[in-house]
Image: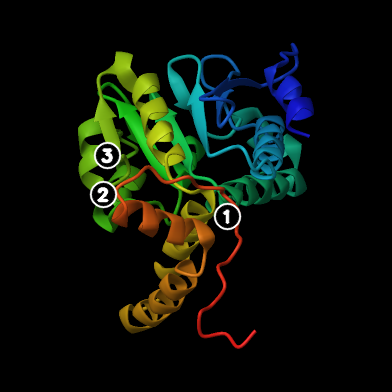
């Protein structure tokens, strides 16, 4: 299956709004938004990105995804032409719902998704950045008018929303929208470096950690601790987790399988 999809990812068609690149032994997929200067999140772009992410999530060899862009904008947001009254409210609802589904998919994916931003991310484009698990941005990047429930403090988000003024990359870093800030010329390399570090760990344990993070942020503190205790106990039952512990104790490099296989419980009567 991987060979077939790899050929699909590598092939370029004139109608494609997204370019695909493979790195680090095909374990990192770099999806490049490529629709002119603004990379609008048109319904076609959203559908293509959604389908790419769905397919990638089924490939065990993939350890992370990078969403990058050509041109001066990561994404300027929705395609304005699709939001006129001529398009109709039915089309508008479909666009917003599909876009929301695509961003929720990023959160639910087993592998981390990294936004590689070297330009402007506005409106739904800023929301896409916030939906990604990690964000590597260039010093010249700008972010403006985010959607609701974005990873930015309320006062900052309201300032952006009500004034329509962008925040620079430094402000985005302070607000928690950006994970790492580097020189513009280093953004791609830094994103790949982050992907490489992710790939050094067990895929299954990473997936468990990501799912736990998003689940516990919606809980109150007491419930989060209780839920965390159950997740960590379950994590210790995974073969890759025990491999990591044994490798640490014996001072050797771990050999992860990436599977969700469990070790036999020593207290089990079987």
Query: Which is nearer the N-term, disc 1 or disc 3?
Result: 1
Q: Position of residue 53 (x, y in %)?
A: 64, 39
Whether pointer 1 and pointer 3 mark residues with C-beta atoms closer than 8 Å, the reply is: no
Which disc number belongs to residue 172? 3
Q: Position of residue 201 (x, y in %)?
A: 43, 45
**Figure quadrant of residue 144:** top left
Q: Position of residue 86 (x, y in %)?
A: 74, 35
User: Cα distance, mark 2 to mark 3?
Assistant: 9 Å
- Choose between 2 and 256: the one closer to the eye: 256
Question: Does residue 160 appear in the picture of this structure?
Answer: yes
* Residue at which label 2 appears: 156
| Residue at numbered disc 1 | 108
Label 1 crowd bin: few (<14), some (14–19), many (20+), radius 10 Å = some
- Badge 2 density bin: few <14, some 14–19, many ≥20, Cα 10 Å: few
CA distance separating discs 1 and 3: 24 Å
Q: Nearer the viewer, residue 221 or 147?
A: 221
Question: Is residue 76 positioned above or below 184 on the image?
Answer: below
């Amino acid at each position: 299956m991987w060979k077939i999809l790899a050929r699909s990812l590598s092939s370029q068609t004139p109608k494609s709004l997204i370019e695909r690149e493979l790195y680090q032994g095909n374990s990192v997929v770099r999806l490049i938004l490529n629709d002119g200067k603004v990379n609008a999140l048109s319904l076609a772009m959203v559908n293509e990105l959604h389908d790419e992410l769905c397919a990638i999530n089924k490939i065990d060899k993939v350890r992370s995804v990078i969403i990058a862009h050509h041109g001066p904008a990561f994404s300027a947001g929705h395609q304005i032409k699709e939001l006129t009254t001529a398009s109709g409210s039915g089309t508008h609802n479909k666009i917003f719902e599909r876009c929301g589904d695509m961003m929720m998919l990023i959160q639910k994916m087993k592998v981390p998704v990294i936004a590689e931003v070297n330009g402007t991310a506005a409106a739904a484009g800023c929301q896409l950045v916030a939906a990604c698990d990690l964000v590597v941005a260039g010093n010249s990047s700008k972010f403006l008018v985010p959607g609701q429930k974005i990873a930015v403090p309320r006062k900052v988000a309201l300032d952006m929303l009500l004034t329509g003024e962008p925040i620079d990359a430094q402000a985005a870093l302070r607000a928690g929208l950006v994970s790492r800030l580097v020189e513009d010329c280093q953004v791609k390399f830094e994103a790949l470096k982050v992907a490489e570090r992710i790939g050094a760990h067990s895929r299954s344990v990473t997936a468990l950690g990501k799912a736990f993070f998003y689940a516990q942020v919606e809980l109150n503190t007491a419930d989060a601790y209780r839920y965390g205790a159950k997740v960590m106990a379950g994590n210790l039952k995974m073969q890759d987790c025990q491999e990591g512990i044994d490798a640490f104790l014996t001072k050797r490099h771990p050999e992860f399988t990436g599977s969700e296989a469990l070790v036999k419980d020593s207290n089990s009567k079987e």
